[in-house]
Amino acid sequence: MKYFSTRDKSLEFSFKDIFLRGLAPDGGLFLPSEIKKYTANELRNLSILSYVDLATEIIFNFCKDDIDKKELNALIEKSYKSFKSKDVVELKKIGNFNLLELYHGPTLAFKDIAMQVIGNMYDYLQVSKDKVVNIIVATSGDTGSAAISALNNRKNINVFVLHPHKKISNIQRKIMTTMGSKNIFNVAIEGSFDDCQKIVKDMFNENEFREKINMSGVNSINWARIICQIVYYFYAAFKIGKKKISFSVPTGNFGDIYAGYMAKKMGLPIDKLIVATNENDILQRVINTGEYKPSKVKPSLSPSMDIQISSNFERLLFDIVNQDDKKVASLMNDLLIKGFFKLDQEAVKIIKKDFCAEKISDEETLSIIENINTESKFILDPHTATAVGAVKKIGNLSETIILGTAHPYKFLETVKRATGKEIDAPAQLSNVVDKEEKFDIIENNISLIKNYILNKAI
Ligand SMILES: *Cc1c(COP(=O)(O)O)cnc(C)c1O
């Protein structure tokens, strides 16, 4: 099984290559040359598996040349040992909707589900055996802590986490800046998440620098994250057991919802994938009008979705333009040169077969958190609240599952504003608040950041 780039189908990579590199050398994203499609019978067999065994079956499809299946199973089992929920995720009925809680890992965000597996894959694939690997991560708040938790203290691995200074929640920052040991470096960039992500992408595209520091990445453009996230779409749909099901997903970089699209391609009977955005609504605009045009990032109450350049959309784009790599490259070039690209109405129609999208304002987010708390005595985090809001706006769908992407404690100021309630720290974080924070603040300037990394990377 080989991988290629969305911008050049003739390039060939192994799973190990793409795991380490994250981004293709031409700036495109990696996709697999084959996608397993399950028959109804095979789906029935999968539906009785435990979470760990289901994850093994699904993930193995994409890494069979590089990881032994038994060892993959053991690796996944070990990755989820620290989760508070024995089935990794929890499906709950809240009033009349289904909530899939994905936040029972060590840093209380859905990103732990992929990141814990990735951390163990670094060891298994021995990518740092002969030379220190330097992992550079851009975070809008949750990726950073999930990466630190997964990679803390690993031999021959350094992790540099770039977050937008003063644009993430206090708890998000505290988790990141108190947890790491000496292989972890937190950097607050004076800019937005998009600036952080651009710095990481530009570094990946500078061959000399990338090779010098043996650079690797674990952002949501890393294919290994997507394949871990496909699993819970299957798991939840099997639990509900209906013929057709929709999912509503709080979306930023289009990684989590793209995993849902992959699940559909693999044969899971999904009706609609609902993209919920905050005021940073580039995805809502491209899905409804065809125009992909980033504007300035607006800080919102759901900071992990404060993104205007939604990188994983390029993977969907590849399918939308009939897998024409030259067309993808030319659209991405338009984006670079003109600042936008525009899809025709035929393309919009294709996207709308699988997706719909709604934008939820901060005001709406607060009132959703308040209403759900009043109606059902349940507290949503602001990201998950946007997914509830999107379902309410669209209405009239097949049975829908809402993806709960973060624990409300991570956004306690917002929750208090909406409900007047304080929330207790969950066990995972009970000692975070008092620890000393460690991070450096750097201007939004790639050469300053490269120097910082070169000084610390050994
Ligand atoms: C990262 C994140 C998202 C967005 O996920 P994408 O894969 O970037 O779309 C949504 N909610 C929370 C809490 C997150 O941490």
Image: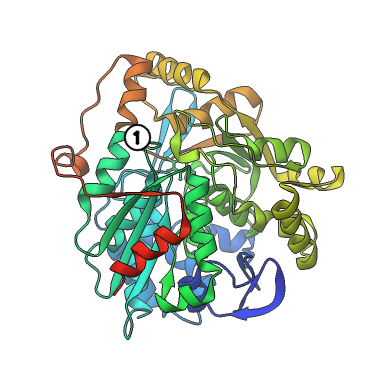
Image position, residue 42 (x, y; %): 57, 64
For this rendering, which residue is in front, 200 or 51?
200
Residue at point 21%, 66% (across, down): 153
The residue drawn where x is 30% and y is 71% is: 157
- In the rendered image, which residue does mark 1 sit on? 169
Q: Is residue 225 left or right of residue 440?
A: right
- Kind of residue indicated by mark 1: Ser
Quadrant including the C terminus: bottom left
Instruction: Kindly identify the residue that appears in the image at 62 percent across and 23 percent down.
Output: 393
Where residue 142 appears, as percent x and y from the top left, is: 38, 46
Do we see residue 263 in this rendering? yes
* Quarter where residue 272 is shown: top right
Q: Position of residue 439 (x, y in %)?
A: 26, 49
Q: In the picture shown, does residue 354 fall above or below 129?
A: above
* Left or right position of 57 against 355: left
Residue shown at 38%/58% (left/top)?
Answer: 115
